[in-house]
Image: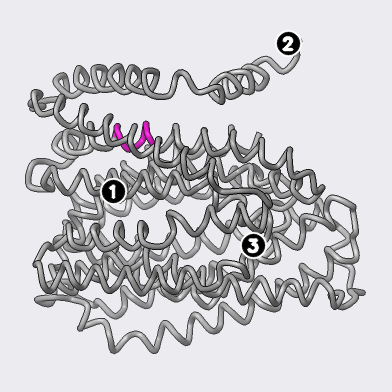
Amino acid sequence: MNSSISTIVYLIKLVLSFAVRSYFIKYLGVEYLGLNGLFTNILSFLSLAELGIGTSIVYELYKPLAFDNKEEIKSLMKLYKRAYDFIGVAVALLGVLLIPLIPFMLKGGTNINHVYIIYILFLSNSVVSYFFTYKRSILNADQQNYKTVVNDFIFYFFMSIIQIVILKYTSNFFLYLIVQIITTLASNLVISLIVNKKYPYLKKSKVIDVPDSVRKSLKKNIIGNISSQIGAIVVLGSDNILISSFVGLVQVGIYGNYTMITNAARSLIQQVTGSVTSSVGNVVAKGNKEKDYNIFKLYLFICSSLAFVCGILVDFFINPFIRIWVGDKFLLPEHTIVLMAIYLVILTYQGASRTFISAYGLFWQQRWKPLFEAFFNILFSLLFLLVFKLGIDGVLLGTIFSSIAIIVWYEPWVVFTDGLKRSVKSYVISTIMFYLKFLIGLFIVHWTSSFFIVKGIWDFIIFVLFGLACTLLLYLLLFGFDKQLKVVIKLANSIINPNRN
């Protein structure tokens, strides 16, 4: 249910987000688009203040929820609330301290007026997101994430409609951002009411302290998560800052159109696969390692299938889509698209390991990994930007190289040695085979697509039909003989026909 509802809702949100962005480009322009992307990335760094507390507490909630230990749940939720109230204040203060650095991140300056007021509005939205949001954790840990998804979608729908109206009739970026702030706060308030109604015992004033054993485990996982937060934010949040600082704000806007599509693909995959993290956590809490391994193999096959299909489709369609959507002046070179596809594949394939790291609570074991990943990401990116002058390609290569150097091997190693307690050899063989299949598929579609010239909507429709057929054929040829495919088909049938024997 979590996966199905999350996927349907995300697809609708995706259509809305493209509609809003189209109006944004038409009525505000690419420079505002670049500023929007830059400030979004800057504020993503402030989420470091969260320190991985949310992920750690969700992990600690799995067991008390499984055994209906209301007192321990109350203790954890109270601790969570105090932590997030403090974080909200900390983010506000850190955000204000960053204001003097803004001019250094705008290569060549900008023609946009009131940049600092715009930044303050972005910061305000980030700050209010921390209040009342802690109650989402209990729904996620209790395998009821779909309630959060539906609630957020309702608010997102009305926000999108209002923002489109504002863009069309006023072209006022300030009003656009104010609506976003109000929506964030209102959505969190409603979630709080939903949780209070479903878990009325959380409102009781008498709350015992968190047990020492849980506090010790929580402290250890938070420390492990701090580095994870740093690594993820530096790797995923630094691209627009580097491009703005070394290439220019307009390029951030152009690149942002592409990352909107690749992030949409990645987020859609996360909606499908990430929604079952709490279910995996519930299974591994019962300690059956053989069952855990069988689930991991199935999960890895699903992630590898999604990675292959998404990587191929991005390489096939993204430039023709951009041409039809916003025009030739917003296109990036084909070699840049290949790098985007490769990075998307790496992130998606690693989804299996990351889900099991969260389910097993293996944050402490990988506490150093993200720090090395962040260091190499910045090092490689600056090398390609400053020495080789590769621009956007340099940023993408820096991210890909750092991923290969660190996460591709370290995350599965942690899962197998500390979680599944078995040899990682089978995973290594599967991974090598997967990337060989993907590179073969990428070469074929890249060569095939070069024979097509998409100039209009009908050309694009024909190209899409051909591309989908080609991708399906390649997938069946390269993955159709894997026995895990039969398991996935059987699972899908059980979901579609739950009453069928």
Q: How is the image coloured?
A: one colour
Q: CA distance from mark 2 to mark 3?
A: 38 Å
Q: Quadrant of the N terminus?
A: top right
Q: Quadrant of residue 417?
A: bottom right
As drawn, is 349 to the left or to the right of 490?
left
Which numbered mark, 2 or 3, is in the foreground of this view?
A: 3
- The amino acid marked with disc number 2 is Arg
The answer to whether residue 3 is left or right of residue 335 is right
Whole-angstrom CA distance, mark 1 to mark 3, is 38 Å
Residue carrying label 3: 362
Distance between mark 2 and mark 1 Cα atoms: 44 Å
Numbered disc 2: secondary structure:
loop
**How far across and down, in percent of the image, does residue 310 sit?**
36, 35
Residue 193 seen from this side = yes
Q: For this rendering, which residue is in front, 124 or 143? A: 143
Q: Nearer the viewer, mark 2 or mark 1?
A: 2
Question: Does residue 375 lie above or below 197 as drawn?
Answer: below
Label 1 sits on a secondary structure element that is: helix
**Picture residue at 68% right of the left edge, 56% below the top:** 360
Given residues 276 and 433, the one toward you in this image is 433
Where is mark 2, residue-wise? 500
Q: Is residue 132 left or right of residue 316?
A: right
Could you say which quadrant of the image residue 475 lies in?
top left
Instruction: Find out whether residue 300 is within the magenta segment.
Output: no
Q: Residue at x 76, y 47 (%)?
A: 282
At x 36%, y 43%, the residue is: 345
Q: Is residue 133 visible?
A: no
Q: Label 1 sits on what residue type? A: Arg
Q: Which residues are magenta?
A: 308-313
* 282 left or right, relative to 303: right
Other residues around mark 2 within 10 Å, as few (<14) / some (14–19) / many (≥20): few
Q: Which mark is residue 450?
A: none
